[in-house]
Image (spheres, rainbow, N blue to C red):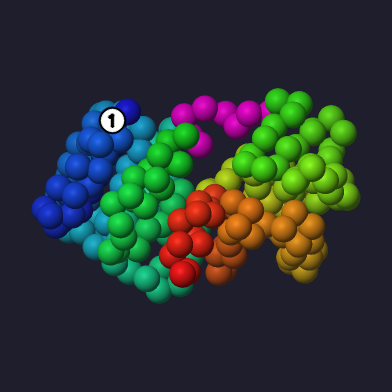
Amino acid sequence: MRIAIADDDDDSLSILESIITNLGHISVRFGDGERLAAALLRDTFDLVMLDWNMPGKSGLQIIQWMQTTLDNPPPVIMLTARTAKRDITEALHAGADDYITKPEEDTVIGARIAAVLRRTSASASMDKVAEFGGYRLDRMAQTIRHDGKDITLTAKEFELADLMFRNRDRTLSRAYIMETIWRTSADLATRTLDMHVSRVRSKLALRPENGFRIFTVFGYGYRLETIDAAKDLSASE
């Protein structure tokens, strides 16, 4: 797959090139936003990785421009040193698929790239039975089994859990979840969504030791994160 990387720092671009090459993909580098925008009009990329602060067009401006200009904009990962919650929220609302703050380990960046490509390269599986780690979802019976035990969920709780597992490691906005699960607009009381997320988290024991956790993205929505329990445990020792 071809990945466009845009940053005005050559060292950062070289690091990204190495990570992408190790993943078996091809990278095309750009030193400013204007050159990237011109390339996006004439070329195809499977993923775009952007720094926020660049000459020409900023990373945020590129995302906004892609959403209004390109018929099928590729997924975007924002990779930047800006860590303020308002910046993360603004980028995600603008259309970024993920947001990584610098500095970050190469292995983590590689895993986040792989996760976005997996998610966007093919439609999520809708088999009658699906397994995610130790969780087994039966979509016909709307039941979930974990550690040999059946977990009782309401219809909406099952739909929410299924949606989050199918979109694991992807941040879902409140509006997206509400429209998908409740078939209504974001005007629905946010307490309804928060209550269901809390119940799903509790009933399914979505904790690092079980391989998943629900992460709240301030001002945006939720993300079901895949956790390597062994690494998480060793890091806490």
**Residue 183 in sight in this render:** no
Q: Quadrant of residue 41?
A: top left
Residue 111 placement (x, y as % from top left): 39, 45
Query: Where is 128 relative to 56, above or below?
Result: above
For residue 6, side relative to residue 178 (left or right): left
Query: Where is 132 relative to 12, above or below?
Result: above
Q: Quadrant of residue 22?
A: top left
Residue 221 placement (x, y as % from top left): 60, 60
Report the magenta residues as a range. 119-126
**Residue closer to the observer: 191 or 224:** 224
Query: Where is 10 relative to 117, above or below?
Result: below
Q: Residue furthest left?
A: 10
**Is 164 in the magenta?**
no
For residue 86, side relative to residue 21 (left or right): right
Residue 73 placement (x, y as % from top left): 41, 37
**Is 124 in the magenta?**
yes
Which residue is located at x 46 percent, y 69 percent? 237
